[in-house]
Amino acid sequence: MFFVTYVRRELRRRMRQAICIALGLALGVGLVVTVAAASAGVTKAQLRVLRTLYGEATTVTVTGPKWQGPSRPPKGTPAPQMGPHGPEICVAGGTCTSAAGKTLSANDTLTEGISVAKVAAAARLPGVAAAAGGIFLSESTLSWPKNGASTARRGGNALGARMGGYSLEGVDTRHPTLGPLGGASLISGRLFTAADANAHVAVVDAGYARSHRLRTGAVLPIVGPADANGHTPAIRFTVIGIVRQAAGTNPPRVYVPLKAAQDLMWIKTGPASLQGKVTTIYLAAASAADVPAVTREVARLLPGTKVTSASGLASEVAGSVTSAAKLANDLGRWLAVLVLIAAFAVASLLTMAAVARRAAEFGTLKALGWRTRRIIAQVLGESAAVGLAGAAAGIALGYIGAAIIAAVTPSVSATVGSDFDSGGTRLIGGSPVQTVAVPLHPSVSAGMIGLAVLLAVAGALLAGAFGSWRIARLRPADALSRVA
Amino acid sequence: MYQLTRVAKRYHKGRRTVAAVQDLDLTIDDGEWLAVQGRTGHGKSTLLNLLGGLDRPTHGTVELDGTSLGALPETRLTRVRAEKIGFIFQTFNLIPTLSAAENVETALIPLGTRSAARRRRVAAALESVGLADRAGHLPAELSGGQQQRVAIARALVKDPTVVLADEPTGNLDEDTRDDIITLLERLWRDRGLTLILVTHDTTIARRAQRVGVMHNGHLTIRQDSPNR
């Protein structure tokens, strides 16, 4: 085809200029693709953390307000203190015994409970496909060695105790996929069923199972609240399943039915008790379009709570992942835009210069009877070919940029739950603020490739348009007189 | 047939006005060979541009077969050039990236001729100028004379009624010049073309039927030659 032949030959003649224009476009486009890939990777990292915490199916979460109750444990709860002969534990009535060889545990949460009736009310809201309540507890332990030696030097606290703990999630067994368990993969045993609602059964995280040598069927003792005598008996939970969450996340270690979690709370009565309550409501909207309305309705139903949609959850994530997101979205985006503008400008100038040099050629074609628009089509065809080459090179540069980012910054830190900071000392050990290392996987999607092609070709055609404007104004007699 | 009536063309160069062609009346019959001589800057090329519709007169009319070229819209004027007028330039004006055959083909593109027919006509045109064996050569691979032959083939491939040649031998050596003029003359006779040829060379001009001299924008017909 004559048109293609002419374009090909002309680009071959102006190979250096064509390469220069294509490389300029490639640089701009590559930067756009890299920034977009990094941004997508950061967003994925954020969502990865959030899905671990809130599950795949959850689109809206509701959490109760910060706990505003007393900072001291209820009366009668065993409490450690430093006695005349070393650390000791004191129970109701003031009786104190040596803490040597003992473990003190407590399960606590840092948000106020939400009535389960509200969970049912939320489930009936229009646009809500399912609703489930969950309880997040932080089990904290203090343990003393049998020989009474201080463990302060080995990382213990001032009372000579080694601190420990883990997070525990109470799951609505009718909707196990709503909540953090929804993001887990079952690797052994089974998950909860509705029949487990009142049972002392547990699903544990694979890492926790490995470190505590737990298998399906094993017994996991979890310390319950203190009785009237101040004793804290351990409740025996049977492990029915072992799950694995996404690598680099820090999910709850143990999952138990909701009723069991309510009973484990060390405060049994009063406003701090979780009887008949949950700390979080997980909602699944019927569709993405319903999310805004559901968010509004839930906020109206539950004033004073924190209602967050899936997209809003991303703003909950702090840490270097957020810095990376800002870098990609702000600096990266503007840098890419500036480079693109520069590339377009250079391409336009070079194309206009080339058209000027070819004035006699175009004047001859006009003399031969070529219409202006046909000559313009020829120039635009050359520009489009350069644009496509720039797009291909830009996509390749984008992939390289994404690979470099993945290699240089293999993971970022994500912190979730800063609103849960207690500001007090109710807890000993353990914090609901979770900082996890999340792998950063910048990814180039088909949409980005399409955008790259569009930008490069648009930039090249823009340059061609400037040249075409010169052609349109070209008078054949003037063009031919330049040769003479 | 060309009919020029009180044609004038003026250019503005800064504050100065240059009258390239002044008050020109001229009739050129179908099949006539008119040579136009004159010194540089006296309006020869401007006259050729007006005849070819590459420029529009400031005053007066330039009619080709009863159609005023100056009054036509650009698209129709372009169409007239595509169908009826062939150009031959002093510097050949071949597209450097296209082969000899492809350069000749450029004259057929505006006519919408199908590619198979284009190839046939191109081959015939190159054959008529003796360059059938150079069809695939780029202009840089051809001598000056060969390039001008390609340009002649390009001008004639569309079977025009008019050929306008602006110093077609200006860049050629003496022997090649003779060859080119002889070729042009033969083609003019064989095809019954209207040939308007601008030249400095008096020996070439004398081979035409009529010779005109441009001086300060005025055309004077010096004499009718024996060819008339």
Image (cartoon, helix red, strand yellow):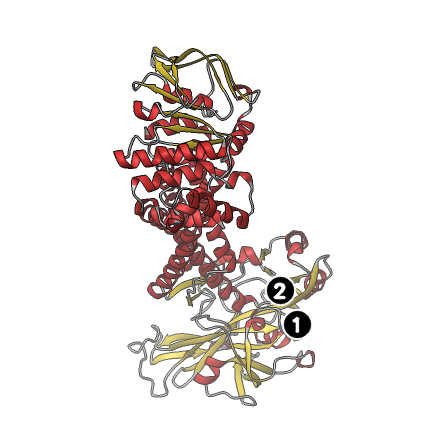
Q: Are marks 2 and 1 on the same chain?
A: yes
Image coordinates of residue A398 in percent, x first then y, are 40, 57
Image coordinates of residue A329 in percent, x first then y, are 43, 50
Which of the image's four quarters has the C terminus of chain A? top left
Q: CA distance from mark 2 to mark 1?
A: 10 Å
**What's the residue at 31%, 76% (across, down)?**
A152
Query: In the orientation shown, which residue stands out farthest toward the front?
Result: B226
Residue A316 is left or right of residue A402, and the answer is right
The front one of A171 and A447 is: A447
Question: Which residue corresponds to mark 1?
Answer: A175
Image coordinates of residue A482 in percent, x first then y, are 33, 28
Q: Chain of mark 2?
A: A
Q: Residues within 10 Å of mark 2 (few under 14, many from 20)?
A: many
Q: Residues within 10 Å of mark 1 (few under 14, many from 20)?
A: some
Residue A449 is left or right of residue A193, and the answer is left
Residue A322 is left or right of residue A176, and the answer is left
Image coordinates of residue A436 in percent, x first then y, are 42, 67
Tell whether label 1 touches label 2 (CB within 8 Å): yes
> In the rendered view, would you say A401 is above or below A213?
above
**Helix, strand or loop under label 2:** strand
- On residue A282, the disc is 2
Say if residue A2 shows up in the picture: yes
**What's the residue at 58%, 60% (across, down)?**
A64
Total numbered badges shown on the rendered structure: 2
Label 1 sits on what residue type?
Answer: His
